[in-house]
Amino acid sequence: MPVKQLPETLINQIAAGEVIERPASAAKELIENAIDAGATRIEIATAGGGKSLVRITDNGCGMDTADLDLAVRRHCTSKISDTLDEIRTLGFRGEALPSIGSVAKLTITSRRQGDPEGAQVTVAGGRMSPVRPAAANTGTVVEVRDLFFATPARLKFLKSERAEAAAITEMVKRMAIAFPSIRFVLSGPDRSTLELSATGDDQLARIAQILGPEFRDNAIEIDAEREDVSLKGFVGVPTFNRGNSAHQYAFVNGRPVQDKLILSAIRGAYAETVPSGRYPVAVLSIQLDPAFVDVNVHPAKADVRFRDPGLVRGLIVGAIREALAREGSRASTTGGYGLMRAFRTGTDQARAPWHADQSPSRPLAEGRGFSEGPQAAFDSLTVPSGRTDAPDQPEALSPAKNTVSPISFANHRLGAARAQLHENYIVSQTDDGLVIVDQHAAHERLVFEEMRKALDWGRLASQALLIPEIVDLPEEDCDRLMAHARDLDRFGLTIERFGPGAVAVRETPAMLGEIDAAHLVRDLADEIAEWNTAGGLRSKLENVAATMACHGSVRSGRRLRPEEMNALLRQMEATPGSGQCNHGRPTYIELKLSDIERLFGRS
């Protein structure tokens, strides 16, 4: 079969298949053009999920007759000249408009400021009509009708109108977060109107418009720089998480991207603080010299390539972990919301529903207090003298009942312990409310942080067992444990091979006190089996620390004296990340006095 030159229309339709995947792709390209044109107000109207209509109206600089004639031709652009090294605009290829025009009915009406009249051009299925005069306001209106009418096979692969409309909404939200100084309005018969007023330089206000007002109460600001690469934005506290990664937004030089490197770095930064199957909320903006990033690697410009990816990943992981260490003792306000909803009766909810904007005050920040190691405060934990058997009806208050703690809560953010409920939950009174603490989850986090800190100084202290404990295990588990015996020894856990199907435990970590060594070793064997072989030594050691911390923590069902409970609270105030345990669950929830009064109708 002879080689032949394809017709221009077919070439454009092939190109459109790469650039315009769905209605949201077309809307994204047109919105980028409006932003590059300096628009401060962008209105998007859709019908049929964008298949029937996508109309973008902006108040940007507009185009004259000559510009319109070139704008719908391939590889015609005003944004680059001779090189791809200094791309500072969202669009740059000159492919979007001719690609859309080759598969849809495209009409562009535009007028420059100061021009007596506007101009209009139409392209339908790749056939362009002459540019003609038209009445128009300053700016540009781009109307796309019957998307993919010229390539009906592509229509079969589109999703339902609702799904396509949702994809456009999500795209507009990402653009809106990236450009808070622009007012966006999204409307149409296939959706509810979404209006996002401009917030100027207040990016957090724009983010709250998208993610809801509760994000403002649970956000930690990020501001870091390394080797001329700057990182700014906001991340949620670990206990403020979601069931998917749709609430993670990343921008590179103002361009919304869904880059695997960035998403992987976010996941790594929250590695031991978010439960499996849950995802942190994050909005990150990276600024760097355009010469150090390649944005021309994906047809939809969704991916980028960094010249030094290790630098960027390290900056993201380090900045987020530093922020979590700085304010990680905060618990998300969602716990307070849930508690309020649980206490409200059906009548109350009907009369005065609980809204997210009626949130409790901003959650706790890191405080100061008890600074000894966590085990020091709990070495003497014993069941108080007297009745030790469990009563038929559990008492509401354990040892602290009828006892007023001598510690003043005025100077402590987590207050003073007043009671222990069901031998697991500590109730603490603060200046303006109360805090409920899960004693096991909280102490587990404290032990983990102490072990991680001790790792920086070398090997953890150990205590030798008078008689080594022999643990029977499958041979493959023994092999895994012995392969990491040197790492385990750094934690003070010394093991030796004892035949083909057993290991001997000779030393255990001193800070854990008395533990079930056999149970710990079996859990570690399971943990090692789950390790990602590509993980670094540090991440593996922290996996070990998390498992050991769980075994060395104050157990649920253990009665604590008032001074022990207060010692736990003081240590939580002084420990980064104490707002959640090693598995990502919250360690405490807070309820403000104003919220309690609202429950009783006193406010």
Image (cartoon, helix red, strand yellow):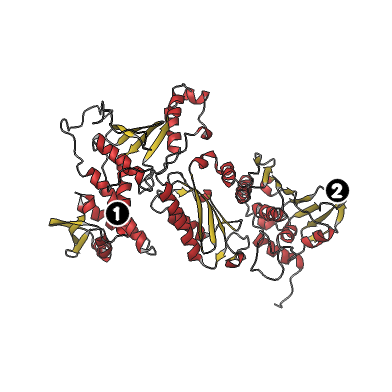
Relative to 408, 173 lies left or right: right
Q: Which numbered tag is attached to residue 135?
A: 2
Q: Amino acid at mark 2?
A: Ala
Q: Residues within 10 Å of mark 2 (few under 14, many from 20)?
A: few
Identify the residue at horizontal 38%, vertical 52% (top origin): 272
Q: Residue at the left extreme?
A: 466
Q: Which numbered tag is attached to residue 451?
A: 1
Q: Which numbered tag is attached to residue 434?
A: none
Residue 456 percent coordinates (x, y)? 32, 59
Relative to 530, 149 lies left or right: right
Q: How many marks?
A: 2
As drawn, 56 above or below 390: below
Q: Secondary structure at mark 1?
A: helix
Relative to 469, 75 lies left or right: right
Q: Which residue occupies the foreground of this view, 457 or 336?
A: 457
What is the quadrant of the N terminus in the image? Answer: bottom right
Q: Which residue occupies the foreground of this view, 192 or 389?
A: 389
Identify the residue at horizontal 30%, vertical 52% (top origin): 450
How far apart are the two marked residues, 1 and 2, measured between alpha carbons? Answer: 72 Å
Q: Secondary structure at mark 2?
A: loop
Relative to 244, 431 lies left or right: left
Q: Amino acid at mark 1?
A: Met
As drawn, 527 above or below 409: below
Query: Residue 442 falls in which quadrant of the image?
Result: top left
Q: Which residue occupies the foreground of this view, 95 or 560?
A: 560
Q: Residues within 10 Å of mark 1 (few under 14, many from 20)?
A: many
Mark sitting earlier along the chain (1/2): 2
Q: Residue at the bottom extreme?
A: 2
Can residue 479 be seen in this snapshot?
no
Query: Residue 464 falls in which quadrant of the image?
Result: bottom left
Identify the residue at horizontal 40%, vertical 54% (top origin): 271
Residue 582 percent coordinates (x, y)? 35, 49
